[in-house]
Image: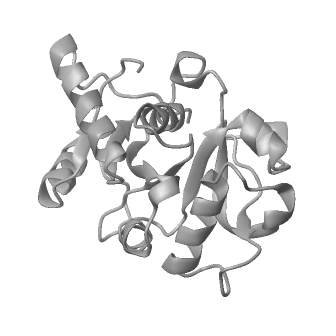
Amino acid sequence: MTSTLIPFATDANWADGFRAEVREAFAAGLPGVFLDGDGALLAFPAATATTAQLHFAISHSSGIVHAAMPSSLLDTLRIPDQPVLASEDSGTSFTVAVDAVSGIGTGISARDRAHTVRVLADPTTGVDDLTRPGHVLPVRCADGGFAERARSWEYAVDLTRAAGHPPVAVMCRLVDDAGEVLDGLSASLFALKHQLALCADVQAV
């Protein structure tokens, strides 16, 4: 299913408030919760990712950690798309997974994945600074952002850039104790419990 943001806040002032709250959280290097048609996502800037943030993300998700980033940056780093049959294409635009070449152990730990996402966001990173495959799964996003492709992945990248960070966002699907993806109500309660900014509007940045 293609992800589209839920028009949770139809009032323009509320929508602006959601955006501003998440942008301020991102500016401080803090996570936010996004809602789209597939459920809830945790997101935060990759450039400031910490071991604690990755541990939190892994603990409250299926364990798959994504790095949403512009298509042109993925091409610069020579990170190719995953090969899939047309009949099996989910439309999410996953690439092959990556690890940082140096500064990590096996690549799977929260510390290692925090380092890898910071490497992805570092403007000085080159092709040889990454190994393929690895343990962080990038998502190819439209260079034009949410205005070009209206998905939560692009929305998070736009807000990360607007918050003053390189346009790479760490993202993962939030799940409950039974392994089910959080819906709107559950995500709202999750955000409240953990004092996280919540973004649930369909307006572009």
* Quadrant in the rendering for residue 163: top left
Foreground of the two, 54 or 96: 54
* Residue 173 x/y as whole percent: 44, 54
Task: Where is residue 56? Give x, y as percent.
Answer: 35, 70
Place of residue 68 in the rendered image (x, y in percent of width and height, measured from the top left): 58, 45
Residue at 52% in and 38% down: 153
Q: Quadrant of residue 74?
A: top right
Task: Report the side of 193 relative to 129 (left or right).
Answer: left
The residue depicted at 65 percent of the width and 82 percent of the height is: 104
When asked about the image quadrant of residue 18, the answer is: top left
Residue found 69% across the figure and 48% down from its top? 94
- Judge from the rendering whether residue 66 lies leftward or rightward of residue 100; answer left or right: left
Could you tell me residue 87's position as x and y percent? 79, 38
Q: Is residue 101 left or right of residue 189?
A: right
Seen in the picture, residue 109 relative to 186 is either above or below; the reply is: below
- Tell me the quadrant of the picture where the N terminus can be found: top right
